[in-house]
């Protein structure tokens, strides 16, 4: 993995794909469609590195076998601190542009805003007893799926999160679509399906987003899940910014 070491001796992963992100366009895509798919963020080598991490027990603080909780079929593991450099870098580098979108949304909905820096968000989380890191890796085999849900881990929830596809769809696995359902007040729910390619990220709301209506913006709730994997294995990295109780 390409990495550099800073003056404090902290290793930093390199994210050349991030330079190609058009944040105004991604914000517009979120507003128009509810979710946004980015250009490739991780290289194929970085994706392979993260898939390999799944089997390194020391990297994780807990493992969830989804069938035991009726969450679905498959398993996921929450990274422990210190986060691997690549995971830390993704969380730190994507937070500021996403915080700008989150603050625009907060102003539209009349909600309190979010700090400009991730460490400030985490200080607020700590005041509410939310200390544990939430980035995770997920693995689904044939028949694997994930029920519709929201990733809330306490009182404070930063409103945007993202996942990164670590496989090549149709080559490494079939099925396993990323599914989203928007619950619009007094209207039927709207399904959204996206197919990120290798290394691409999907940015989506944790809980709700503002949608313009006749009397200003209103909240539209979103839940996310994964449809059944038909063959092969589907591996994903999930980055959530708020910490967990
Ligand atoms: Fe989730």
Image (cartoon, rainbow, N blue to C red):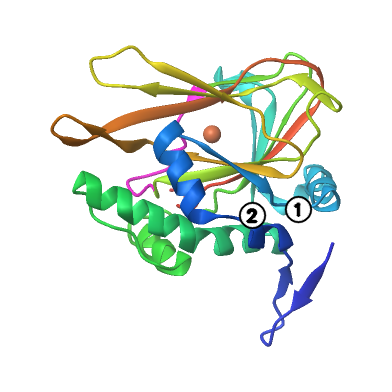
Relative placement, left or right, of 179 versus 13 is left
State the image coordinates of residue 245 (x, y, percent, origin top left).
43, 48
State the image coordinates of residue 185 (x, y, percent, origin top left).
25, 21
In the figure, 6 relative to 155: above or below? below
Task: Determine if the magenta segment contains residue 163.
Answer: no
Closer to the N terminus: mark 2 or mark 1? 1
Rounded to the nearest whole Å, what is the CA distance between mark 2 and mark 1? 8 Å
State the image coordinates of residue 160 (x, y, percent, origin top left).
45, 46
Element on which disc 2 rests: loop
Residue name at image x 66 percent, y 28 percent: 195
In the figure, 85 relative to 103: above or below? below
Q: Quadrant of the N terminus?
A: bottom right
In the figure, 118 relative to 52: above or below? below
Element on which disc 1 rests: helix
Q: Main secondary structure of the magenta part?
A: loop
Mark 1 residue's CB less than 8 Å from ligand 1 = no
Residue at the left extreme of this rendering? 215
Disc 2 crowd rating (10 Å Cα; few below 14, some 14-19, many 20+) is: some
Task: Determine if the magenta segment contains residue 150.
Answer: yes
Disc 1 crowd rating (10 Å Cα; few below 14, some 14-19, many 20+) is: few
- Residue, disc 1: 58
In this rendering, the count of numbered labels is 2
The reply to whether discs 2 and 1 touch (Cβ–Cβ < 8 Å) is yes
Residue name at image x 69 percent, y 43 percent: 200
Residue name at image x 39 percent, y 39 percent: 31
Work out whether residue 231 or residue 133 is closer to the camera in this orientation and state it.
Answer: 231
- Residue, disc 2: 80
Residue range in magenta is 148-157
In the figure, 1 relative to 175: above or below? below
């Amino acid at each position: 993995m390409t990495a550099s070491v800073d003056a404090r001796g902290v290793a930093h992963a390199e994210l050349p794909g991030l330079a190609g992100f058009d944040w105004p366009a991604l914000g517009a895509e979120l507003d128009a469609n509810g979710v946004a798919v980015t250009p490739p963020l991780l290289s194929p080598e970085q994706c392979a590195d993260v898939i390999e991490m799944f089997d390194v027990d020391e990297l994780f603080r807990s493992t969830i076998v989804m069938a035991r909780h009726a969450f679905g079929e498959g398993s996921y593991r929450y990274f422990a601190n210190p986060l691997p450099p690549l995971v830390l870098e993704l969380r730190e580098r994507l937070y500021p542009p996403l915080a700008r979108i989150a603050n625009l949304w907060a102003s539209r909905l009349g909600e309190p805003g979010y700090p400009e820096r991730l460490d400030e968000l985490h200080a607020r989380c700590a005041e509410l007893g939310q200390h544990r890191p939430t980035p995770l890796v997920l693995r689904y085999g044939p028949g694997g799926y994930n029920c519709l849900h929201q990733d809330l881990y306490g009182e404070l929830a930063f409103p945007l999160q993202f996942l990164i596809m670590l496989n090549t769809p149709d080559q490494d696995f079939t099925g396993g679509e990323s599914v989203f359902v928007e619950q619009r007040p007094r209207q039927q729910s709207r399904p959204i399906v996206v197919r990120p390619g290798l290394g691409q990220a999907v940015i989506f709301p944790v809980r709700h987003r503002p949608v313009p209506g006749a009397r200003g913006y209103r909240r539209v709730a979103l839940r996310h899940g994964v449809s059944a994997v038909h063959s092969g294995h589907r591996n994903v990295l999930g980055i959530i910014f708020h910490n967990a109780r």
